[in-house]
Image: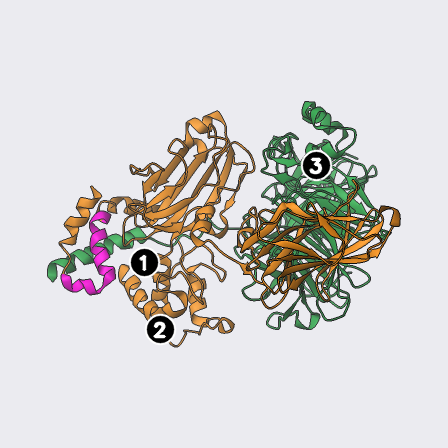
Amino acid sequence: MFKKLVTHSMGVCHPVLLQARLLIKLCVSSLFLSFTLTFFIVSKGALAKEKQSISQDLEQIKAGEILYQNACISCHGAKLKGATGFNLVDGEWIHGNKPDDIISNINNGFAQAGMPAFKGIFTPQQIAQITTFILAKREGWLNVNYAIYPATDNLINDFKQVGQATPMKSGAGANNLADFDLPENKEYVINFEGEFNAPWQEPTTIWFDTPPATKLIVEIDGEKAKRLPFHNPTFWLKPGRQHLRISYSTRQSHPALNKNLIVMVANQDLSIKLAGVSARGNASILQKDFVINSQTETKIIRRKTVKLPPSSVLVGLTNQFSYAFNTKLCAIVGVWKGEFLNVGPNIDGRGKDGSVPLGEWVFHSPESIATDKPDTPCHFIKYTRTENPTFYFTQNGSNYSVSGYTHPDGIQFDYRVDHANNALHISTIKLPLLDGYRFMSSQGEVRDNTLYLDKNWQQVSVILSEH
Amino acid sequence: MKKPSKFIHSSLIYLSFILGAPHWNVNGQEPFYTPDGYTIETLATPKNMPFGITGLDISQQNDIYVATRLGEVWILENRFAEPGKEQWRRFAEGLTEPTGLLLDDNGSILVAHKPELTRLVDTNKDGVADEFSNLANQWEFHDNYHEYNYGPVKDKDGSYYGVLNLGHGNPKAFSLGAMNSEGGYRGWAYKVSASGEFTPFASGFRSPAGIGMSPQNELFITDNQGDWVPTSKLHLVEQNKFYGHPVSLRDDPRYDITSLRKMTPDDFAEFMQPPVLWIPHIEVANSPGNPEWDISQGKFGPFAGQMFIGDYTQSSLFRAIIEKVNGQYQGAVINFMNGFQSGNIRIKFDHKGQLWVGQTSRGWGTKGEKPHGLQRVVWDGETLPFELHDIKITKHGFDLRFTEPLKSGSVQNDSLSAEQWHYLYSSNYGSDKMDLITVKIKALQLSEDNKTLKLTMPLSAGQVVAIDFSGIESVSGRKPSVSKVYYTVNQVK
């Protein structure tokens, strides 16, 4: 039905107006919107009175857009998604998201960040128009509150009771996102509710990455949202402002289901994902990388890392080789070649995901370079970085250190004995299985992936060579 | 041209309704409360750096040392520690989500992070840490995101203390509710002696995000509401005692997983230590941080010696007023100040009488919308705020002492009201207020100096009593900025 509307209203628009991209989309939307007029009059009346100096008139938005295109695009991007300047349409507002905050920020600028003060360049009316435009372009929640309830039978059978039940936990959604990862129970009903802004220039949907059988309620302005015939739950959004409510129950959901839902705003055929509604949806749209490279300077980082055991210390050398020393095993539990590390997955939200070593693995856990020890565990003493990063540890009363160095053919590990308890002194170093690399050693003999050290050894260099 | 114009014009009207009025306060107005004479000042943090401050200590020279969630240690020297003058320098990087920092006596810096309690030393004095030594790592860290390591604090014998968070989300781990333990002293407080000997110290914690050593050399730990924790609470922590969350007992040699699964809340309650006080959920706090004592000797106003605690979720500060009854601590909490820019997880007094607040907001929501920050609370040095100063339990009820004499006319029977409730200890995530009732205040008596209000009311042990005193007024015609206090009656006199 909607498609028909679109084609019909298109004929009304005059070709001259094609120049104003905004107005063309306005024609498309206007008929669609006319059906919703009554609804919005009721909604507006129901909204609390707010102090506002911003007109929500479309003319103001249009004027603001033209000003934005003249003055703001170079730093904040044509789609307001940011470049040198911040993203202006997502939920994260470091300098305040109230209209007065935005006006003030435009007026005063941020000199140290390179944003000029626009007071005096634009009139107060123009600054208000730019602000109106920015606010109208907001994608997603303007504000969202969550409430988590125990999954009682009453609640599951009738989600409407959510309004009357007492939540276990509730609050405002961080960064104006619906975080489905908040509940720490296994069974719960979670409710998100708030004011939501969807693009007004085109019809959009809200899409859930979850099976169709999931117990889910989506309400827009107090009424059940209209569902589209896609496999995943997908519902029409209204253009512009609307009150959105999402209720989700995990009772009877499959145990393997990832309850941390991806929820996004998409276009009508789901070919383009426009904005995140849930925290995970937002993360997958942004796919934030935070790469640490060690090209000019050796880096040492301790983080949860994919494929490496807990308590690993990662060292990025300057010749593209990196290794990980584990402080519980006192072993080298991984070596890789490439850029050092992307910690992006690990530094946002609750930090559940591991950092990702970049490049190719030479080996990783469970393979390791380990001083072969009887059953007593080692004790990690310290690492230093006055010169080359060096790890110090104790095993069976003897003190050792190991340090990884750049080598023309790969990477070199120097083991030193700092103090030997002769009876239990280490005599072998277990080596990992390698593909495409070979071991060289400054002393001793390599047999069956083990380095047999000379008696009373004081130091040894073990080299992993690419050639 | 005319037809489209009219069309667009009418559409303007339609859209103006749709776009509506900005509605920035879905829940209505948030109450802000600030005692007279106190202000919040904001310090800028390094630009474009994730700077969630989860470790905070201040040197004798008033240099500010912070540990950030990204894993770094930064220093704001005293001469730069003023709004507008901020210049930060980085001391260390590469740590795993630190949640505490302590300046040690020999100039080294201790940081508690997930895998280790690490001592950072600048051996060659170039301004950057180059020795990272392992003071303690004898617990198990399974790379679970919830397995924080809080601390350290130090006692007068030179021993260090920390406390370990439980894990969450691993279906194979041992759980009796929402949180879990994969073993290795999760949920335990630990002690490291001056000579480096590690001892598991006390068990039963869940998400004990605040650890503090009082000026009287006593160890206090706050724990956050959740499974087995009816509401956030404050504990006095002593060796070999159990503080409530049972999954940590898997590391107690007297128990094992099989026996623990058979035990009931009543079984655990028999040997569990009650908290010094309960912290009512949301009304006061959701996720309290470290207790910190006002050692400013008056430079921070009239609350010298009292305990302050920050709340992460409410982005606020509250006070804990405790006393000994029959040799055991109990006492009250009362809100102090809110409206902070982010989550208040770490607080520390400097030597000028300013209270610094290290902030972060990531992963768990906060009222303050900024992702991180550093603020401080400053008293103007002269304005006496009109607030509840102290509360003590008596044989007949409570004595409420105020900072300023009360206007005797403002003390009517209906100036104050009281209610009480208790909490249910179980595997449930938090507890409602159980058996909530109004308690009749039978009599009110003002002391001779008009500063102490003596309440006569029935008391029962095992209840939290909330006293609302919004009706009273001081001789200067002021009302207190906070007018509700919550006293945990563990024992009556």
Do discs 3 and 1 belong to a common subunit? no
Chain of the residue under the numbered disc 2 shown in the image: A
Q: Is residue A335 visible?
A: yes
The chain containing the residue under callout 1 comes to A
Q: Colour of chain A?
A: orange
Q: Quadrant of the C terminus of chain A?
A: bottom right
Residue B222, how many percent across, how many down? 69, 44
Query: Residue sitting at 62 percent across and 70 percent down?
Result: B86
Q: Main secondary structure of the magenta part?
A: helix
Above or below, A309 against A91 in this view is above
Circle 3 residues within 10 Å: few <14, some 14–19, many ≥20 = many
- Point out residue A113 in the picture as x, y percentages from the top left corner: 49, 71
Q: Is residue B377 left or right of residue B298?
A: left
Outermost residue, left side: B2
In the picture, one chain is green; tell me its letter.
B
Check contact, mark 3 vs mark 2: CB within 8 A: no
Span shown in magenta: A15-33
Pointer 3 indicates a residue of which chain? B
User: Which residue is the site of mark 1?
Assistant: A56
Dot 1 amino acid type: Gln
Q: Tell me whether circle 3 and circle 1 mark residues in contact (CB < 8 Å).
A: no
Marks 3/1: CA–CA distance:
58 Å
Q: Quadrant of residue A225?
A: top left
**Disc 1 to disc 2, how far (Cα)?**
18 Å
Q: Which mark is residue B183?
A: 3
B332 left or right of B253? left
